[in-house]
Amino acid sequence: MISKVFKGWSDAINATTQSATVKIDGPKYVAAVWEEDYTKQYLVVGWITVMAVARARYHARSIQGGHRCDRSIP
């Protein structure tokens, strides 16, 4: 569920684009920099929370007879 997002290159080249040019004039080290993206996980947790709250409210209303009364009747 956690995905990786490309952030750029490091060491012999500093770029944030997916492609870059490196002049090879000797030994070089280039590393791709990746970052974890938790967006999908947050969306799933949010959806589960909304559904749980909705179910709790529905259950509470069904126990009260299907309607809510906020004022007393004389």
Image (tube, helix red, strand yellow):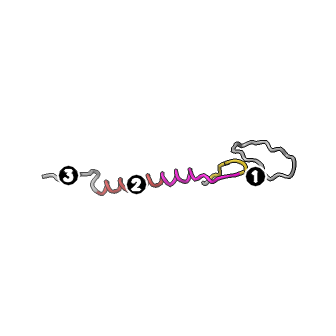
Give the numbered dot on residue 67: none
Q: Which of 67 and 43 is in front in this view?
A: 43
Q: Between 14 and 74, which is closer to the camera in this rendering?
A: 14
Badge 1, how many Cα within 10 Å: few under 14, some, many 20+? few
Q: Return the disc, 3 or 2, that comes first in the chain's sequence.
A: 2
Q: Name the residue under label 3.
A: 71
Q: Of discs 1 and 2, which sits in the foreground?
A: 1
Marks 1 and 2 in Cβ contact (< 8 Å): no
- Per the model, the C-alpha gap separating discs 1 and 2 is 49 Å
Q: Mark 2 points at which residue?
A: 53
- For the N terminus, the image quarter is bottom right
Q: Which residue is drawn at 78% across and 50% down?
A: 12
Q: Residue furthest left?
A: 74
Query: Quick check: 34 above or below 23?
Result: below
> Distance from label 3 to label 2 (Cα)?
24 Å
Q: Is mark 2 on a helix, strand or loop?
A: helix
**Disc number at residue 11?**
1
Q: Residue at x 76, y 47 (%)?
A: 13
Query: For numbered disc 1, what is the local secondary structure?
Result: strand
Q: Position of residue 2 (x, y in %)?
A: 61, 54
Residue 4 at x, y percent in the picture: 65, 51
Residue 42 as seen in the image, left or right of residue 63: right
The residues colored magenta run: 33-46
Select label 1 or label 3 by which is in front.
1
- Disc 2 crowd rating (10 Å Cα; few below 14, some 14-19, many 20+) is few
Relative side of 69 to 12, left or right = left
Q: Which amino acid does label 1 sit on?
A: Asp
Q: What residue type is labelled 3?
A: Arg
Give residue 50's position: percent from left, percent from top: 43, 52
